[in-house]
Image (spheres, rainbow, N blue to C red):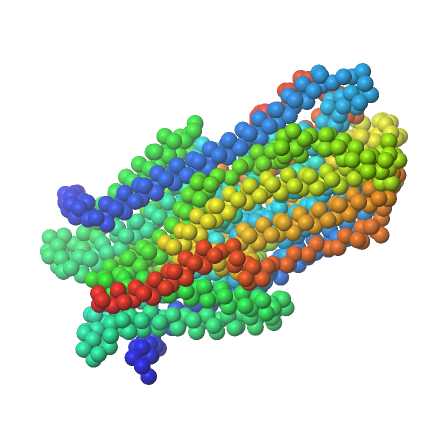
Amino acid sequence: MDTLGLIIGHQFREWKRNRLVHGFIAILVVLWVFALYAGIVWYHSTARIREGAASQSRENWLGQERKHPHIAAHFGNFAFKHVNPLSIFDNGTDMYTGTYVYLEAHRQNDVLFSPAQSSSSLVRFGSFNIALLLQVVIPLFLFALTFNTVLAERNAGTLALMKSSGIKPATMIRGKVLAPLLLVSAALAVLSLISVILLTASSIPFGIPDLVKLGLMLLFHLLYYLVLLVIAVGVSARSRSLKQSLLALTGIWIFACVVWPKLLGNISGVLHPLPSNTLVKNAIREDILNGLDGHNTSDQRAKMLIDSFLKKYGATTTSQLPVNIEGVVMVEGEKYSSRVYREHFRRVDEILRQQQHLLSFAGILDPLLSVKNLSMAICNTDPVNDRLFRQAAEAYRMNFVQLMNTDMAEHSKENEFGIYKVGREVFDRVAPFRFRPSGPLESLSGYVVDLFCLAVLAVLSWSCIYLIARKV
Amino acid sequence: MNTIITIFHFEWKKAWPTRAFRLSLLGLLAVSLYAIFNGSSLIRDQRRNIDRALASEDSVFRSVVAQIHTTDTASADGKIALRRLASATSTITSPYKRWTSYWEPGSFAFLSAGNRDVYPYYHELEPYSFYMRFFKNEVSSPLRQLYGNFDLAFVIVLLFPLWIIALTFDAWSSEKESGTLAIVSLARSAVTLVTGKFLFNWVIVSVVLNGILVVALIVADHPRIIDWLRIVGSCNAYLASWFLLCYVVCRLRKTSVVNAIALTACWILLTIALPAIFNTVATTKYPVTAEIFSNYIRRVQMPDDPAVKAAKLREFFRYYPQYADTDTSMPAIANKLYVVYGNLSDRSADPLLERYIHEMRLREAFLAWGNFFNPVIMCQRELNAVVGTDLESYIAYVKSARAYVQVLKESLTAKVFADAWMTDDELLHRLSFVEFLHQTRTK
């Protein structure tokens, strides 16, 4: 066995005798099982409620009485957000994003009822899930395991002994970093395996892509722990006393996990302020009415469309047209209003992206920010997933509204709002809403900066081992 | 007394030259001032958004009145346009004529924003149907909401205890570890020494805390002194509880490292672990089903079946017998039927709102019960309650908005059933939400 292996083995033998480590592992297991159990219960109850509401909405759509297709488009549908099994591990921003949206003709409504809106402000203390364990609690355990790792050797005189027996300080530091990393990796591997078995046993659809995502999530966290461990061992090597080392690491932990993310989150909002709902909605209304260029009113657009159809079919009045021009105007109007909505929502999304970029770049100073973003992304509980849900819901809305408008244009005559009616034969052509979260690679595509920051920090940390070793 | 003064004098001379003490003091002052600024910005933005919504409402109604006066009533199209602008039916059912309700931020809301950035705090309401338009979201950043507000409550509830721990964790052990305890004990008892040190630190922390709260009082807009005193009382009592905890740990006479670990563990347990665990249990045990509203968010539509229409009218006349002698034949009743449907739809959704509120209250009651021993949660709840950013204040707002819509609905319904048109005065001088609240309170 090489020297590194011996150091790691020695560390494990020491931990085997250490009741504090046993306590840490026991606490970790208990908390993990609690978070998993609570997550499974929550998953089942939420999925049941949302699936029930979705099938009710579907029944209402199909069971509505015979009516004019455009009136049916106004009756509308609902899109409910799919409950993602990986949200049991990290629910990310799901608490703060809406859960369902009413889809109707002419307008794109807000996605309503974020879970946080149904709670008091105590919800801001966060919920206890596996991500909290991985990102906040385990780092604390790691700091507790390592704050005295070099100091204890120095105080006991074994550090000088090791040096004199030919063990390079860099190898020793590597061992001090790798030992807790291996310990936590082993613990996480076992706990993850148990989790997957429990999830499958609880009839939660947990497929291969989810397994890959879980693996990636753990990998990101291990890189995060590597950075933290190098910091902890470095502090332990540089400190003059246990008290100093402990205080420094506690300070780092509090700053990195509690103060800095909140401070940055708020600064990002101040630097990139969002417009109010009233401003956005008024601007949308204005642009639909007067055109995106401000010169082409909705009346003018309709007139141009009618004129083009009259010209195309060589007709003098709209009643001579082979289609119902009112339906055609509806189809085109819907396309135009959707374009306007898209443009305004794109601007809002751009501001949100800028806010997110600030937090992503700040990951170079605080790896928690990077790992948090990556973990949310891989679990499809990040703002990007919410955006994709909104886009899928809008695509679905456009599809069924245009299906109704096209039916109106092709099968009814002008001024037949009260006469022409369709029923289930048409409503059935609208498929139920489906939204599936993106795959692992696609989920991470918007987080290149975070991946870069975490990778750079991990490599830098590993290189810093030599710097730490020189001071030992 | 002399002993205490001596300890104060000595502790000050020892603490002030220390870089760590000065840095922590300046750091805490800086984050406190930033938190006041940040909280104020949030509330200022919210006020601005409310003002925009009010201005938008006003501008729509002014434009309606202007259009009424410029419409050419000689032509058939002009008559239709005029009906669309000025008839009571079109006023109650128009998606553009909206009345604004808002959750007025209290003078000290900036100190503890609570869930003000999560709850929709203003609404553009349609008297036709409350539920169809009430539920909305303000444009917001989920990431910012995830990380929470950097307000003064955060600094006081989470950061001040850390400062107290840093100042006091080695009050006794440092003397023991540096060997000075034996010397000091010759003149004074160790208990007096530790107590003196705690009193000194308590004075320092209190001066800083109350100084910051004075700044908050100066920044606040039309503050009520009684509210400020309640805030001061709660915060001082809260920090006193942390001093007590630190004192108890120090009196156990363990080493500085053990004290630091024990107190940090207490801080993590009380501020992060236990609240998060109780939140998780509350969410799982007390689900709040917002999905129940989906049928009422949907646009109200009138069925074709005459029997259904007749049944709806009968139900409506039970609530409003004064309209029972209305001509119910078509087309006279056509427009009125929309108003009837909107009214009945809201009435049938009201029990769901009550259920929704009840579910939220159950969850909150569980959280209050579960955290009854936790000073962190108690202080946060108290601050939110005093500054009016708590759940009950929000529920009160929601209920007021619902009542406001009902009042608007009923006054407009009277005009609809009288086939009346809106006058300029009625369009320009509408019942505002503030006037409504004032009337309700007076009643």
Q: In this view, does A207 lie above or below A324?
A: below
Seen from the viewer's position, the closer of residues A158 and A432 is A432
Taking the image as drawn, is residue A114 in sight?
Answer: yes
Q: Which of B112 and A111 is in front in this view?
A: A111
> Could one spot residue B233 in this view of the protein?
no
Residue A470, image quadrant? bottom left
Residue A94 as seen in the image, left or right of residue A77: left
Say if A341 sits above or below B416 in the image: below
Tell me which corner region of the image, top left, top right, bottom left or bottom right, holds residue A146: bottom left
- The x, y position of residue A383, in whole percent, is 54, 51
- The residue positioned 47% from the left and 35% from the top of the image is B43
Q: Nearer the viewer, residue B378 or A186?
A: A186
Q: Quadrant of the C terminus of chain A?
A: bottom left
**Number of numbered discs:** 0
Rendering coords of residue B140 (x, y %):
53, 43
Q: In this view, does B422 lie above or below A413?
A: above
| Residue drawn at (65%, 56%) of the image | A435
Relative horizontal placement of residue B172, taking residue B48 as reference (left or right): left
Kindly identify the residue that appears in the image at 27 percent across and 44 percent down.
B25
Residue A237 vs residue B234: left or right? left
A365 to the left or right of B23 = right
Q: Where is residue B334 in the image (x, y as percent from the top left)?
A: 83, 31
Quarter of the rendering containing residue B189: bottom left
- Tell me what residue is drawn at x 73 percent, y 49 percent: A399
Q: Locate the N terminus of chain A by quadrant.
A: bottom left
